[in-house]
Image (tube, rainbow, N blue to C red):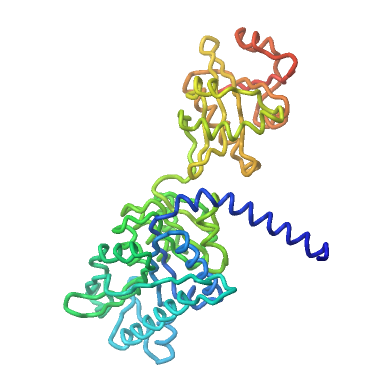
Amino acid sequence: MNDKIISPLVQHIATTTSWFRHAAPYIHSHRGATFVISVDGQTIASNNFNNLINDLALLNSLGIRLVIVYGARHQIEQQCQQNNIPVQYHQDLRVTDDASLKIAKTIVGQIRLEFEAKLSFSLPSTPMADAQIRCSSGNFVTAQPVGIIDGVDLCHTGQVRRINTKAIEQQLDLDNIVLLPPLGYSPTGEVFNLSAEAIATACASQLKANKLIFIGDAHSELPKEMTVMQAEDALMDIELANSYTLQAAVDACEAGVKRVHLLDRAQDDALLQELFSRDGAGILISAKAFETTRIATINDIGGILELIQPLEQSGVLVKRAREELELHIENFVVMERDGTILACAALHPYNAHKVGELACVAVSSDYQGSSRGEQLLTAIENQAMKLKLTTLYVLTTQATHWFLEQGFVTAEVSDLPVEKQTLYNYQRNAKVLKKPLL
């Protein structure tokens, strides 16, 4: 085989192998989890829909329990316009008259059949070869009419009254993918047009789903990670006032869903990147911050060791025994992201002298240059000031310039506390720097 062909092939295999290794912890943790995935009508009509189907099939094969809620707003509006049926909204809710409901039922049925047909695809030499996926859909959502608001009759527009979680769980236990249309049914036999986002939110909260994922519009103006409070602040923005998915994400978190993801339909690999990489591809909204800076515990020893051992081997950090870390673990501050320690530092106080030593500063190579070091230093300084320390010292062999940029100045070994001077390693010849604390 030609070398020009072999080289890219080897590189591709290496990249794929690396991706699987990094994805392995997520593959293990997601197995048996329940994900509710909401797909809007525009996504279904997009060129990426077939790729999304392949990704959903992959998730199913990995043992993830899937509930797919699909929207049809885009298709219903197009069909109404083609039939000269006025499209009316009141307070962001569609006014569903008899003609609109008839179209909605037809469109929703067509989309369900399209979903089922695509999930049944299993030809050889395709991503879905031998998939044998089973789908289940039905009257899982009980609805009631929204009624009359401000004198406007919403007609057949409804709201979720109840989700038959027991029936859905039975289907998930059979490894079936559950498809939920944007329709609901009343005990009196009526059909109501519902918001797919509302169904997904109610379903995720009542099923106690591990994740709720919305695939639709891009929200490039939003940060990649938000708490519920930050998302509520963003909703105050005029441009985001009609964001169905962002409001649904907030509602879901407040109803107990731990993590909600907003993905851009235009990004081909967004779903897999979001689920199987640490940094994801979309926007994460959670009740608690996805990344935290906190005092270390004994359970963090393994993560700290994994982080600092390469730096110890290269001589950047002084080698520390596990026993030493365990003895002084309360002096460490760690930055944790999705259960992984990505940065750490230690503050060793000399209370009699009102000074502290900054030690064992390490940031994962994946996050260097992302201001994590500065954030970690700020956390250490805050901790030092709580202890009423007035000066922070650091000994470094290879990061002098970085510390100078953070406000440290050169100092002498003789400036260190006497007990630290006796431990100074002259063979290592580390630079001594200090920083006064306000």
Q: Is residue 53 above or below residue 296?
A: below
Displayed quadrant of residue 41: bottom left
- Of residues 67 and 190, the one nearer the viewer is 67
Looking at the image, which residue is at 47% across and 54% down? 284
Q: Quadrant of the C terminus?
A: top right
Q: Does residue 263 lie above or below 105 as drawn?
A: above
Image spot of residue 114 (x, y percent): 44, 80
Residues 173 and 365: in front is 173
Image-based side of 261 in relation to 430, left or right: left
Q: Nearer the viewer, residue 134 or 240?
A: 134
Q: Position of residue 226 (x, y in %)?
A: 46, 51
Q: Which image quarter: residue 401?
A: top right
- Residue drawn at point x = 42 percent, y = 77 percent: 116
Q: Is residue 314 left or right of residue 349?
A: right
Which residue is located at x 61 percent, y 54 percent? 19
Residue 356: x and y, percent?
Answer: 56, 18
Residue at the bottom extreme of this rendering: 83
Q: Is 430 on the left-hand or right-hand side of 146? A: right
Residue ID at (57%, 73%): 126
Figure quadrant of the N terminus = bottom right
Q: Position of residue 29 (x, y in %)?
A: 45, 50
The quarter of the displayed image where residue 350 is located: top right
